[in-house]
Image (cartoon, rainbow, N blue to C red):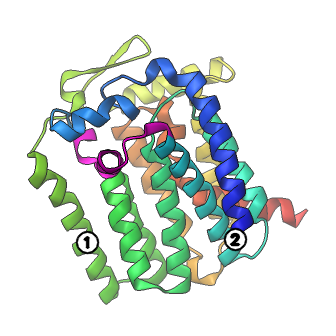
Amino acid sequence: MITAIIISLVMAWMLDYAQFAITRNNYNTRFNGFGCISDVLNGSALAPMQYRVAIPWFYKVFPHYESIKIILMALGLFSMWLMIETIWGAFSYQGMFLVGIFYVVNFQYDYTEQYLELAMWAQFLTALYVGNAIWITACLVIAMFCRETSVFLLLVYLLADGFTWMAVILICAVGISLLIPRLFYGIKPSYLDFGVKIGGEIFKGKNHLTKNLREIKKGLKWFLYPTWFSMLMVVLAFAAIIWGAFPTQLQYVSLVSIPFIILLLFRAMFREGVRIMLPLLVFIVPTIGGLINAH
């Protein structure tokens, strides 16, 4: 475990150095990364960023952004190692490097919460596998403070264990986690109510399906267009479902990829799919490992 922690920290330091060089001109935009932290803390951010309080509240206690990013990148890498080591006992270090590759693909953006969200998804699955109720609940709450898409962890639990008393606790935990930031900052309109400029195009409104379909068509014309990477993750997510690499207890959890991707197509910008779908690496990376080991 000590070796895994050291490798995670070294990789995270190198990745952060590369990411800063690539996206430093994107650091002060008001709806991602470092640029939105002060807005969140003073209550002037709009939804959904205003309610993603985990990183800003951490920053308020420890105001060193690049150090936070290194810590969270390392936590994501280590959490994937821990999940793979606990559930399979193999392919663990290779899995960390696969995660690092997906980090790099995603470096056109500065969204630090994605690393914490990935870490909590991996820790959640690990806790679910070992049956630790406190660990399960803590991971869900932290993930919900990080990003609202972590509500899909409820579905992960239901697919693994069905509707039990623990599911009731997790539903209450989700409700409280959604309520607390709104009590602090009030109900905010969305950035998309006013329009967000992405790559010279204005994205406005809550349904982006038509634009996303155009993005997919455009992506087929231009190799290495960001949409290509999103499409690759969709293919890998469905491979995770078909391969069924998880043990019996967690056999069906990869199915959560389907509603996750559908939500992305309607409510998000598909060119950012690599970033948004990063938590699905908890299904994708073990599947890649299973396919490699099978040959």
What residue range appears in magenta?
Answer: 48-66
- The span from disc 2 to disc 1 (Cα, nearest Å) is 30 Å
Instruction: Say what secondary structure mark 1 lies in.
Output: helix
Name the disc covering residue 1, or none: 2
Among numbered discs 2 and 1, the one appearing first in the sequence: 2
Q: Position of residue 225 (x, y in %)?
A: 61, 22
Between 215 and 173, the residue placed more toward the observer is: 173
Figure quadrant of the N terminus: bottom right
Left or right: 98, with 220 as reference point = right
Q: Amino acid at mark 1?
A: Ala
Q: Amino acid at mark 2?
A: Met
User: Furthest residue to the right?
Assistant: 295
Instruction: Say what secondary structure mark 2 lies in.
Output: loop
Q: Is residue 123 visible?
A: yes
Q: Position of residue 114 (x, y in %)?
A: 47, 46
Q: Position of residue 67 (x, y in %)?
A: 50, 43
Between 259 and 288, the residue placed more toward the observer is: 288
Q: Tell me the quarter of the picture where residue 34 sits.
A: top left
Figure quadrant of the C terminus: bottom right
Q: Which residue is mark 1?
A: 173
Q: Residues within 10 Å of mark 2 (few under 14, many from 20)?
A: few
